[in-house]
């Protein structure tokens, strides 16, 4: 999860299906990118998210 509401993204998981969007958190996207070895594409964003506060319920 993200510490702010700005940490949620629309993701087009299947390029051939532009209407198939999924809402995902930045931490989930970062974990997937690490798993498949694609962290270089968003290195600064991942570093920023790792330095972000832990989420809390308000």
Image: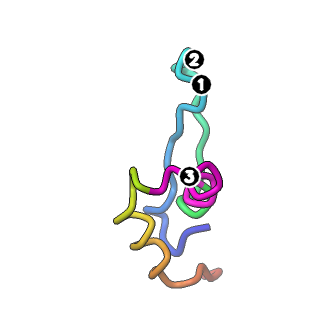
Q: In which image quadrant can residue 14 be found? A: top right
- The one of 11 and 34 positioned closer to us in this rendering: 34
* Residue holding disc 3: 37
- Which of discs 3 and 1 lies nearer the camera? The answer is 3
**For the residue labelled by badge 2, is the local secondary structure a helix, a strand or a loop?**
loop
Q: Residues within 10 Å of mark 2 (few under 14, many from 20)?
A: few
Point 34% across, 65% down: residue: 44
How far, Cα to Cα, is label 3 from label 2?
Answer: 24 Å
Point 57% across, 17% down: residue: 17
* 5 relative position to 57: left or right: left
Q: Quadrant of the N terminus?
A: bottom right
- Which of discs 3 and 2 lies nearer the camera? The answer is 3
How far, Cα to Cα, is label 2 from label 1?
Answer: 5 Å
* Residue holding disc 2: 17
The colour scheme applied to this rendered structure is rainbow
How far, Cα to Cα, is label 3 from label 1?
Answer: 19 Å
| Picture coordinates of residue 26, whole percent (x, y) | 53, 59
**Looking at the picture, does residue 2 appear above or below residue 34?**
below
Q: Quadrant of the C terminus?
A: bottom right
| Picture coordinates of residue 16, whole percent (x, y) | 55, 15
- Is residue 16 covered in magenta? no
Q: Residues within 10 Å of mark 3 (few under 14, many from 20)?
A: few
| Picture coordinates of residue 21, whole percent (x, y) | 57, 32
- The one of 9 and 16 positioned closer to us in this rendering: 16
Q: Decide which of tag 3 and tag 2 comes sooner along the chain.
A: 2
- The region drawn magenta spans 29-39
């Amino acid at each position: 999860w993200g510490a702010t509401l700005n940490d949620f993204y629309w993701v087009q998981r299947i390029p051939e299906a532009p209407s198939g969007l999924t809402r995902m958190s930045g931490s989930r996207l970062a974990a997937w990118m690490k798993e498949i070895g694609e962290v270089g594409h968003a290195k600064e964003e991942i570093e920023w998210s790792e330095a972000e506060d832990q989420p809390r319920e308000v």
